[in-house]
Image (cartoon, helix red, strand yellow):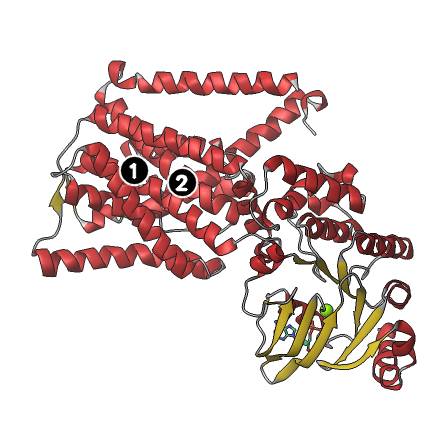
Amino acid sequence: MPILEGRGVTRYFGGLAAVSDVDFQVEQGEVLGLIGPNGAGKTTLFNLISAALSPRSGSITFRGKEITDLKPYQICRMGLARTFQTVKIFGNMSVLDNVLLGAFFGGEGRIASADAAEAAASALEFVGLAEAAAIPARDLTLANQKRLEVARALATRPELLLLDEMMEGLNPTEVNRAMGLVKMIQDKGITVVMIEHVMKAIMSVCGRIMVLHHGAKIAEGTPQEVSTNRTVIEVYFGERADASDS
Amino acid sequence: MKKTTSKRMFTFGLVLLILVLAACAPLYAPVYTVILLTSILMYMTIAVSWALFSGPTGYISLASAAFFGAGIYTSAILGKALPLPLVIVVGALASFCLALLVGALTLRLKGIYFVMFTFGLVELLLHFILWWEVTICGTTGRVVPPAGNATVFYAMLIILVILVLTVFIIRRSRYGLALFSIGENEEAAAHAGVHVTVLKIIIFAVSALFMGAAGAAMATRWTYIDPRIAFNPLISFMPVLMAIFGGIRPLYGPIIGAAIFTYLEEFLITRFPYYYMLIFGIIMVVAILYMPDGLVGLIQRLWKGISGRKHADT
Ligand SMILES: Nc1ncnc2c1ncn2[C@@H]1O[C@H](COP(=O)(O)OP(=O)(O)O)[C@@H](O)[C@H]1O
Ligand SMILES: [Mg+2]
């Protein structure tokens, strides 16, 4: 049984079908890449899964349970955490407090303070931000702010993690570190769905890739299959070549 | 480590000393002073309650007068039938319930819409009670059984102490952290597992609870009240100004702001009865321009400047 499954997931903005009749399955333990040109509906799909938005039609199940009508906090507590494309950190709170919040509220049931502190510290350690624990989150570099979002999500003890363009805006060294982090997350046994534009990262980290275009799923398969798929090459890589000039 | 414990002991001692001095005020101070101190305690209570919710979350509520007024009216209705402590408790609960209802309706609103709605609530309640008194009771206004100056003073002092302890506990708890995270980024807080709506409504209601208690206690000082006295819009604006003036973030910011403002108001009203609002406004503008973190922030900055690097905590 897939850990996350969507059937006929659809969402409109006015007349625009941002996500249109998309079916997907995510298997336990895998790293699934979600790619597609800008405006393809990738972030919208994450918003639908995490209940930031509700779908017009279709259903989403997580670990066999229907989650379509739940609230964001409930989905997080069930073990499905996410990060944001445009970072949403608590800038005036310390790095540690950012992560503590996830530890206190993101898990199932009430956690003891000592356990939360331990979970937060180990999440910070895991992403390599232990030294920065005391400084205000807004003082971190973009790369570290993205790591902080990952740490906050990990502190909620998720089984599945949605990463929205974690490598966008990072330099090559930072991208390499971020790739390493994704692999470490997978090694912990956490399933990952990642939206990414950095092809090198997608190809080396993801076991499987799903391609969205104009809100519809146009291809799915191993990196090998997807990168040789004719439709994908036409719509996706074609547009990417144009987009990368701007 | 040792430095922070000794600092904490010092603060604790200082607070205790002020508290004892204040508690004995009715024994040695003239009546006028006791009445002024009671006003100060009242504004401190409203300002601290306001800052409990609006400080960390950034939802600027102008409903304080509604919750204070609900307390006043409870006192006016039940004052003859029940002893003062019970009246205060009922007034507090009435405001708490009102805030639960209002919070459930309005806390989905953001920014200026929330501000306007909360202020509208004051007018709404005022006119509702006015209508109710005129059409159902046939008379407007009512007589409140008076309590002694010292009694009201002690009632307010106890309310303030309980409030400060409550705020202290909430702020240090995980819910204090969650409140701040809502102010920083509500969406991220929700996706990190915080039940944002329920937390906002409950803390909003707790802050209203203390405003209602203050209203119920203070009502006994007016002897006669009507809706326009009970739902005075100034009660909505003053705590906001006091908290901003003193500093919203630290717990003692609104306390200091309320003390200075109430005294200043008293002073200006007696000296410059026609211009006092104008002078007040100028002080406020200057405060906002030059003290972004309030008086407390300004003093902290000056202190750091004087004592130099070696004392600066990092
Ligand atoms: N909140 C919103 N309101 C209106 N339109 C939106 C909203 N969010 C996304 N869209 C539109 O939906 C489409 C898909 O957007 P998005 O999911 O962000 O794409 P991607 O993440 O793949 O770049 C875009 O055309 C975008 O303009
Ligand atoms: Mg996107």
Q: Residues at badges 1 and 2 in contact (C-beta under 8 Å)? A: yes
Identified by mark 1, the residue type is Ala
Three-letter amino acid code of the residue under disc 2:
Ser
B292 left or right of A39 in image = left
Asked whether mark 2 lies closer than 8 Å to ligand 1, one says no
The label on residue B49 is 2
Left or right: B109 in relation to A150 = left
x, y percent for residue B32 = 24, 24
Q: Quadrant of ligand 2?
A: bottom right
Question: What residue is disc 1 on?
Answer: B214
Mark 1, ligand 1, within 8 Å: the answer is no
Q: Residue furthest front?
A: A1
Residue B286: x %, y % from top left: 50, 40
Tell how many labels.
2
Q: Residue B186 sits in which quadrant?
A: bottom right
The residue positioned 49% from the left and 44% from the top of the image is: B55
Considering only vertical position in the picture, is A46 above or below B60? below
Q: For numbered disc 2, what is the local secondary structure?
A: helix
